[in-house]
Each structure stands twice: as C-alpha cells, then as structure tokens.
Image (cartoon, helix red, strand yellow):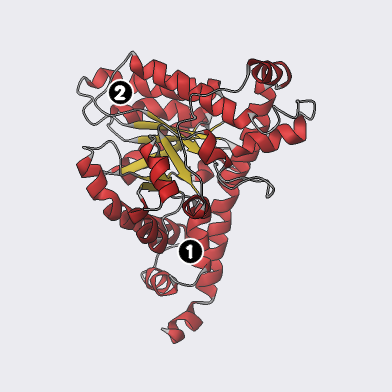
Amino acid sequence: MSGPLNSLLGCGTQLWLDSVDPSLVAEQAPWGVTGATSNPIIVADLIKSGRFDDRLAALAQGGLSDEEIAWSLTDELVSGAERMFLPVWEQTRGDDGYVSFELDPLLEDPTRDIDHELRVARYVELGQRWSAGHPNRMIKVPATPAGIAALPSLARAGVPLNVTLIFTMRQYEAARDAIWRGAHPRGDLSTFKSVYSIFVSRIDVYTKRQVPGLSAQAQGLVGIVNAQRIWRSNAAFWGQRPTPLRQQIVFASTGVKDATEFPWKYVAALAGADIQTNPPATNDAVRLSNQQFSRQVDQLPAQEILDDIDRLVDVEALERELMAEGIDKFVRPQLDLLELIAKKRRELPQLLQQT
C-alpha cells in the first residue's frame, strides 16, 4: 500500500471502489479498498470494452431478453466482487466488505408513469430477491419518495441498505428514519447495516451555475460542508441508538468535475471517518500523489463562510434541481445499457464467429 493511501486509511477512512470491473477490483483491493459499488454506466462500459462478448453471446443463446441479460451480467459482476471482499466482511463480522447492487432505475422513469404504491412494492420485491443468498451484497435504493417508502419493509426483512441520490439533510433524515422504523422492531440488530450515500461534487457544480453570488471562499465548499453536516447528524443519531454494526455515511460523487482542481480535493476534505466510494481514477491519483492525509471531516470552515452558504443557497431549490438531474442520470444509463445489449445482440453472429 502506498504512503498516501496508507495515511488516508490510517486516519479512519474506509475506501470503496466505484466499479465492479474484475480487473480493477483485483488491482485495488491490495491497496486497502474494502468494498465496491455498481451501476448501469459501469456495466455498460465493461460491455463496450468487448471483454464480455463471449458471456453476452452465451446469455443470448440461452434465450434471455435484453433486460434479462443486463441483470444477469450485473448479478455476475457484483457476485464476483462480493467474493473478493467476502474475507473483509467475515473479518469485520458484517461491518465492511460490501458490494452495492442498484435496483432497477426504470422504476423512476417519469415517462412510464408507474403508480407510487407499485413502485414501492417493486423496490421491496426486487430488494429481497437480489439480496437473497448474498451476505455481503448491499441493496442500493434511491432517496426518491418511492425508494424511501420501501425502506422500512426492506430494513425489517434484514436487507443491508445503501440509500443513494442523497443531496440534502431532509433526504438523509427521511431515509434514516424510515430505515430505523423498519429495523428497530426486529429486536435482534446484530446484522443490521445501513449506509447513506451523500453526493458531494454535484452540489458544487450546481452552486457555481446557480449561486454565483457566493464568496470566492465559499464557492466550491458547499458540497463539502453539506456532507460534513450530514455526517455529524448521522454520528449524533446513531450515537444515541448504538447498534452492533456501524450505520455510516458514504461520501459519493467524490471525483472532481473541474480539471483545475486537485483530483483528491474531496478525498482530503472528507478524510477521517466513514466510507469514501471513489472512482478508480481518483483512487489512483491519491495513490500516486505525495499527499499525507489527516482527519478533516469534522473540521468545518470559518463561520463567515458557513453564514454565506446558509444565506445564499436555497436548499429546497438545490434538491429539486439536483434530484431531477439525478433521476435522469439514474434512468438514462439503464436505457442506454439495454440499447447497447440490443446492439450487441445484432452483432451476435459476428461475435460467435470470432469465438
């Protein structure tokens, strides 16, 4: 393990990989990475690489539809990463070593006009189905109205949960309270595990576009401050309700969107506690840097910066816009993945000739 990564892990950060690429998992696990996550973009990029053409051909020959192929391949990729991290899960008795599996994004497709209660029921059904038999699989549910409404039933059923697409304290609190309502009546909480994925860099992209009046000192810090505040709230809540396993914040969307910024900007600012799910390139940049990371997650900026943020950032407007963008970025990649598989299917005779 390199010095920079060693310092990051040594100050209290758990490092997860924002990929289930088997090669990247094998490469980065020895660096101290202890978990991973998946989404349709990751799966599509792997298909585009051509490395899985043989597997796609075999699944197509088995009579599977495009959608069935997408979920079969996703399941296989996540299962492979789970096997890699299972020793971590066993060693920590279920506190780490998870791989997140994203439920069907098309449940949130606004063009499908799916009834709210049906969406909720499908989240519960799919969450239980895809988690069964996978001790270190974490089911990823979005912080949408239907997703949050499904959380009590999933928590009651003992499903490890990763609530994603969280941008604000309101969303976090709604998700956390929903999960606790479901988990608390279980009595035995020895296997209860939940994490809350707070998106960071997308908030700074938003404020640069929509809140230009922020001071130069505050601009670019809103996502970090927001994540720090939610992290504090999470620590306080679970500190009053101690559970055998930690209920943690995941700092997500940690790759910088501005090429002029250091690639480890968010890694450094949120170092010291809980989980960072970083893009492969971000972990690599950290590894190759000359940085020594120290605990910063509980170090808020000066009060005048906080006052500037609180005065000028309309959190409700931020949530509305970023959730609309987030749902689009949630749904569209799944549609693109299905189109990609359909294209590959059309090329299947050629693929079979090459195998």
Along the viewing direction, whichever of 167 and 269 lies nearer the viewer: 269
* Percent x, y of residue 67: 46, 57
Q: Is residue 119 left or right of residue 152?
A: right
Q: Amino acid at mark 2?
A: Ala
Tag shown at residue 46: 1
Kindly give the residue lying farthest to the right in the view shown.
Answer: 213
Q: Quadrant of the image for the C terminus? A: bottom left
Q: Amino acid at mark 1?
A: Leu
Question: Crowding at label 1, few (<14), some or many (≥20) Cα neighbours within 10 Å?
Answer: some
Residue at x-position 41% and y-position 45%: 16
**Badge 1 vs badge 2, beta-carbon distance below 8 Å:** no
Is residue 339 depicted above or below 113 in this figure? below
Question: Crowding at label 2, few (<14), some or many (≥20) Cα neighbours within 10 Å?
Answer: many
Q: Is residue 327 left or right of residue 33?
A: right
Where on the picture, by quarter, is residue 300?
top right
The local secondary structure at tag 1 comes to helix
Is residue 298 depicted above or below 164 in this figure? above
Q: Residue 37, can we see it? A: no
Q: Residue 182, can we see it? A: yes
Residue at x-position 33% and y-position 13%: 240
* Percent x, y of residue 2: 40, 53
Residue at x-position 35% and y-position 49%: 32
What residue sits right under mark 2 in the picture? 183
Mark 1 or mark 2: whose residue is earlier in sequence: 1
Marks 1 and 2, Cα distance to the nearest angstrom?
A: 36 Å
